[in-house]
Amino acid sequence: MLEGLTAVQIAISACIVFGAFVVRGMSGFGAGMIGIPLLAFLIPVHTAVSMFGLLVLVLFTFLSIRDWREVVRHELKLLLAPTLLGVVAGVLLFKHLDSRLLLQLLGGFLIAYALYTFAMHYFGLPEMTCSDRWAIPVGFVGAVIDTLFGGGGGTLVVIYLHLRRVGRAPFRATVAMLWLFEMIARIAGYGAAGYYTMDSLLLCALLLPVMFAGSWIGERLGNRVSQETFSRLLAGLLALTGASLLLK
């Protein structure tokens, strides 16, 4: 695979990864939903999903060590078990679900929530909150969707933590720690299925510096915006994610 890529294609891949992780650094999520569809134009989609998963795993390992003190441990404990169970269920259900319908339902939900968030900011709608009892279904369903499609389900966790009024820094630290455990389980499955070859590992190694650079720049850009602006940015990304799912 690597020999089949030109220098221009590798450079384009690096730009895609850089941009995707700038967004992830600013918002705490969204790298896979941006990067994987674009990389799929250059490399096989299964390779894109598995390789991107490895990049995310490396980043989240670093972030989890760095930001451990910011993690909201109560929320992490509630979300972890159903998330891991969701990964197992996603593997088992892979061949038996109407994937297009599931993606459309998720996309519609994300757009509806994004519109609510915008209406809350611009038209004064009351802010909603939710109980921590929602952690179990959110963690489970989100992990199932992530495992089936390589992303998308994590946005449910993003909405849950947003409704729980988790601050920006604890939010980023908590989702990084949660998704670290999810990625370990998913990558074990991808590896067992034979999606990691020497070529895909070499390409991943080439893109690691770009991934770290994009994340570093994204975090610094994100730290300069207010909580209200961050909330609007989050809503915009959710709307774009929902639209991309509807168009798949």
Image (cartoon, grey):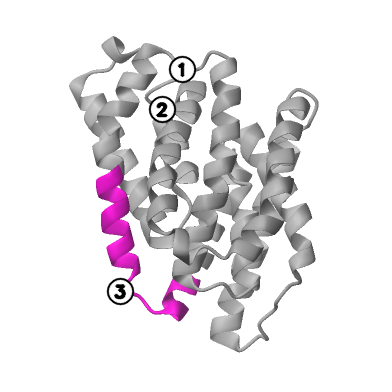
Q: Is residue 231 magenta?
A: yes
- Residue 101 lies in what quarter of the image? top right
Task: Give the magenta-colored segment's residue range.
Answer: 212-232
Q: In the visual, does 110 lie left or right of 57? A: right
Q: Is residue 243 above or below residue 115?
A: above
Q: Amino acid at mark 3?
A: Arg
Q: Secondary structure at mark 1?
A: loop
Q: What residue did someone put label 2 on?
A: 41
**Sooner in the amino-acid sequence: mark 1 or mark 3:** 1
Please give the name of the residue rendered at 59% of the width and 46% of the height, measured from the top-left corner. Answer: 152
Would you say the magenta stretch is mainly helix, strand or loop?
helix
Please give the name of the residue rendered at 57% of the width and 42% of the height, measured from the top-left corner. Answer: 181
The outermost residue toward the left is 7
Q: Is residue 214 magenta?
A: yes
Q: Is residue 3 above or below residue 14?
A: above
Q: Amino acid at mark 1?
A: Tyr
Q: Residues within 10 Å of mark 2 (few under 14, many from 20)?
A: few
Q: What residue did someone put label 3 on?
A: 224
**Sooner in the amino-acid sequence: mark 2 or mark 1:** 2
- Where, quadrant-wise, is the N terminus in this rendering? top left
Q: Amino acid at mark 2?
A: Phe
**Sooner in the amino-acid sequence: mark 2 or mark 3:** 2
